[in-house]
Image: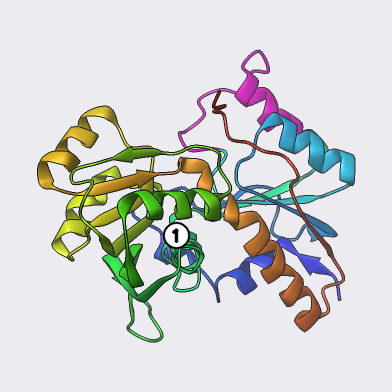
C-alpha cells in the first residue's frame, strides 16, 4: 500500500504522540502536505544543508528528524541566509519533514529509554513528569533515573559512558570524585535545568549534554557528579528509529525504503 505523510503521522502517534511534547516545543510536520506520498525516509538527528543534499542524492522524499528545523518563527524567507536557503531547498525538492523532539524524549520507549538501556541503568522511572498518557494514565516526562546493577567508581563509569556513546572525549563536573556511582539520572540533550530533579530523586550522577559553565558550578555546590557526552549523544535516534520504521514498514506493507543518515552533524571537533 502507498504511504502518505498523514498515514505516517497517525502511526507515529501510537509511539510518541505530539501531546507528549513540552509546552511550546515545535514538534510535528514542518514541510510537506498531509496527502503527500512517501517512498523513501531518511532518518537524522539534525536537519542541516548537507542532510538535505544527502536526501536529494539518495532520492529520499521524507526526512524524519529529532531536532526541529524551524525552532523560532521565520519572518521572511531570503536565500541570502544559509538556514533559510536550506528551507527553500527543502521546498523546491518537495521533501516532507517531520520532527519529533520532546515527545520522543518523553515517550516510554523513546530517547531516554534508549539511553537508559545503553548505559545499563535498571529500575528506571521518569525523572520529571509533565503529562500523562491519555490511554493508560501512565506518567510521561523528560529524563529517566534508575540504578546500576553494581556500583562503579566515577572514573570507571565515565570511561564506560565514553565507550558506550562512541566518543573520544567527554566533560565531567566532579563534585565528589571518590563517591561511587550507584543511582544515575539521564536526560538526552540539554538537561542542565533538570539537575535538581535528579538530586531530589536520589541521583549521585547525572548524564546529560550542554552543561553551561555557571550551571556546572551550581551542580558542584549541590554535590552532584555530572557526565556530559555532548548533545550529539542523541544520535542514537538514527539507528533506533530506522529500525522502528522498518518494523512498521513490514507490519503495514508500506513498501517504503528507510535509511539512516550517514552524516555526523555534531558541530564540535575535539583535538
How far from the left and from the top, in percent, is residue 203? Answer: 22, 61
Q: Is residue 126 left or right of residue 266?
A: left
State the colouring used for the structure image: rainbow
How far from the left and from the top, in percent, is residue 183? Answer: 27, 66
Give the answer, above or below, for where 199 lies relative to 213: below
What residue is at 70 percent from the left and 68 percent from the top?
Answer: 243
Q: Is residue 176 left or right of residue 182?
A: left
What residue is at 22 percent from the left and 35 percent from the top?
Answer: 215
Residue 87 vs residue 196, the one in the foreground: 196
Q: Is residue 78 left or right of residue 4?
A: left
Give the answer, above or below, for where 244 lies relative to 177: below
Magenta region includes residue 68: no
Give the answer, above or below, for where 187 lies relative to 146: above
Residue 110 vs residue 52, the one in the foreground: 110
User: Which class describes the residues within 10 Å of circle 1: few (<14), some (14-19), or many (20+)?
Assistant: many
Which corner quadrant holds the N terminus?
bottom right
The residue segment tinted magenta is: 70-91
Check disc 1 and report its element: helix, strand or loop. helix
Is residue 200 visible in this depiction of the protein? yes
Is residue 90 visible in this depiction of the protein? no
Residue 264 vs residue 88, the one in the foreground: 264
Residue sitting farthest toward the bottom:
136
What residue is at 22 percent from the left and 58 percent from the top?
Answer: 204
How far from the left and from the top, in percent, is residue 238? Answer: 65, 55
Which corner quadrant holds the C terminus?
top right
Q: Is residue 101 left or right of residue 256?
A: left
Residue 132 vs residue 243, the one in the foreground: 243
Residue sitting farthest toward the left:
221
Residue sitting farthest toward the top:
80
Q: Which residue is label 1 attached to? A: 105
Amino acid at each position: 500500500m502507498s504511504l502518505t505523510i498523514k498515514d505516517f503521522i497517525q502511526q507515529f502517534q501510537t509511539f510518541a504522540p505530539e501531546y507528549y511534547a513540552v509546552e511550546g516545543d515545535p514538534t510535528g510536520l514542518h514541510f510537506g502536505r498531509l496527502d503527500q506520498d512517501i517512498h523513501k525516509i531518511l532518518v537524522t538527528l539534525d536537519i542541516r544543508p548537507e542532510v538535505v543534499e544527502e536526501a536529494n542524492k539518495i532520492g529520499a522524499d521524507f526526512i524524519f528528524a529529532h531536532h526541529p528545523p524551524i525552532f523560532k518563527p521565520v519572518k521572511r524567507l531570503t536565500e541570502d541566509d544559509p538556514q533559510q536557503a536550506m528551507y527553500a531547498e527543502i521546498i523546491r525538492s518537495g521533501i516532507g519533514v517531520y520532527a519529533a523532539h520532546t515527545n520522543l524524549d518523553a515517550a516510554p520507549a523513546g530517547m531516554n529509554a534508549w539511553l537508559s538501556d545503553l548505559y545499563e541503568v535498571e529500575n528506571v522511572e521518569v525523572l520529571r513528569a509533565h503529562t500523562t498518557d491519555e490511554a493508560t494514565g501512565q506518567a510521561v516526562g523528560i529524563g529517566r533515573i534508575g540504578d546500576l546493577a553494581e556500583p562503579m567508581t566515577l572514573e570507571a563509569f565515565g570511561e564506560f559512558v565514553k565507550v558506550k556513546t562512541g566518543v573520544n572525549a567527554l566533560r565531567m563536573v566532579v563534585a565528589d570524585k571518590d563517591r561511587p556511582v550507584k543511582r544515575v539520572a539521564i536526560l538526552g540533550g540539554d538537561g542542565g535545568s533538570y539537575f535538581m530533579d535528579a538530586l531530589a530523586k536520589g541521583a549521585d550522577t547525572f548524564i546529560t549534554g550542554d552543561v553551561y559553565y555557571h550551571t556546572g558550578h551550581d551542580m558542584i555546590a549541590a554535590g552532584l557528579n555530572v557526565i556530559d557526552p555532548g548533545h550529539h549523544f542523541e544520535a542514537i535516534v538514527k539507528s533506533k528509529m530506522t529500525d522502528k520504521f522498518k518494523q512498521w514498514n513490514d507490519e503495514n506493507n508500506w513498501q517504503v525504503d528507510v535509511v539512516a543518515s550517514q552524516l555526523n552533524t555534531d558541530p564540535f571537533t575535539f583535538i
